[in-house]
Image (cartoon, grey):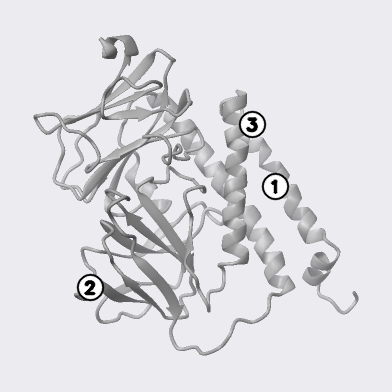
Amino acid sequence: MSDHSPIEKAVIDGTAWRNFCDELKSLADIITRDDTPDDVFNRAEGFRYLTRLLRNSLNATMEFSDEEFPDLQSLGHMVKLGADNPDNIYQGCRLNPNYDYKITGNRNSVFYLSFSSISGSYGSNAKMIVDGFIDNGELTVNDDGSFEIIVSVNQHEGNWLPLTSATKSINIRQTFLDRSQEKAADLTIARIGTNEKPTPFTAQQMHDGLKQVGQYMNGTVNLFADWSASFKPDINTLPPADQAYCQSIGGDPNIFYFHSYWELAEDEALVIEAKTIPQCSTWNFQLDNYWMESLDYRYHQITLNKHTATYNDDGSVRLIVAHQDPGDPNWIDTAGHLLGTMCWRWIGASEYPPVETRVVKIKDLLS
């Protein structure tokens, strides 16, 4: 082993892997912090949350990290973080601002489509700054739904997503009003001007990849544990979030966010009322667990939006968060949870009116 570099030696003798596993072990200290719920249900979900983040970050680092040969990765519905929007498909990959790329796609019928170039990461500085942005409102699309976007530092005619010298990745949001009726956009990305093939995997990539995964896990879990804890003083209300902070961690520039914490006894319900619905592309509300993971929207109605909600005669909307069905079409199911976080979004809105809440007894609703 004398001819090998220190990094190669660390891979050969397993030191790199052992150090990685030690860092993963330390994540238990975040899940078991004094300010997190200490019951078995929420702790179990917290450790499942770690497995989901780990699965996603290993995949992103080991399989989708080639900046010369990028391939869009989808989060999928079983990887959840940061109040992931149940109406969204999230996609992305790493980029290198020294290269130019082309996104080729077909819009199909998805309601909203946006592309953000991002600098920073949760693992390096707990920031994800939007460097460039383009959405379907600006996108020139052919009659057959096809389009191309050039992704580059230098300005380009037509559809162009700007990069900066600090850009590290791209985030794509596909937002549905009704998943059963809309078809997702078909998207691919490729570097412009190369006919090469990827080089074989190296010890350096393994070493650096494990280190990056460890940093990402630590940064992400701490970030959202801190955020959840910060919501607690506003329990069962929905105040506007710090919008500058939301944007600093990768928020969509077209979205105005409300975030908070909820907790309900078995016989209680949370009534949420938006008395004014502004002109907007859409809005949505979702219920999350303590770890800011959306609840299981495959089997429970934990979210409603502009299209799926039932409105009052005056155009206002009332949602009911409850452990049991109160017989209301706008019931938001807690899916077996007694507490968690929640989010309301105004998307492409002309204004951001307040959202009112109050806690009531289930028996009063039923009567």
Position of the N terminus, as image quadrant, is bottom right
67 left or right, relative to 344: right
Q: Quadrant of residue 185?
A: bottom left
Amino acid type at circle 3 is: Thr
The CA distance from mark 1 to mark 3 is 14 Å
Disc 3 crowd rating (10 Å Cα; few below 14, some 14-19, many 20+) is some
Q: Which mark is residue 189?
A: none
Say what secondary structure mark 1 lies in.
Answer: helix
Residue that lies at the very extreme toward the right in this rendered image: 2
Amino acid type at circle 1 is: Leu
Residue 347 x %, y %: 25, 48
Q: Quadrant of residue 107?
A: bottom left
Residue positioned 56% across, 62% down in the render: 60
Marked residue nearer the N-terminal end (3 or 2): 3
Residue 2 x %, y %: 90, 76
Amino acid type at circle 2 is: Val
Say what secondary structure mark 3 lies in.
Answer: loop
Marked residue nearer the N-terminal end (1 or 3): 1
Residue 275 x %, y %: 16, 30
Q: State if disc 1 and disc 2 touch (CB < 8 Å).
A: no
Closer to viewer: mark 3 or mark 2: 2
The CA distance from mark 3 to mark 2 is 49 Å
Q: Quadrant of residue 367?
A: top left
Residue positioned 27% across, 49% down in the render: 177
Q: Which mark is residue 32?
A: 3
* Residue linked to disc 1: 24
Q: Is residue 11 above or below residue 326?
A: below
Marked residue nearer the N-terminal end (2 or 1): 1
312 left or right, relative to 215: left
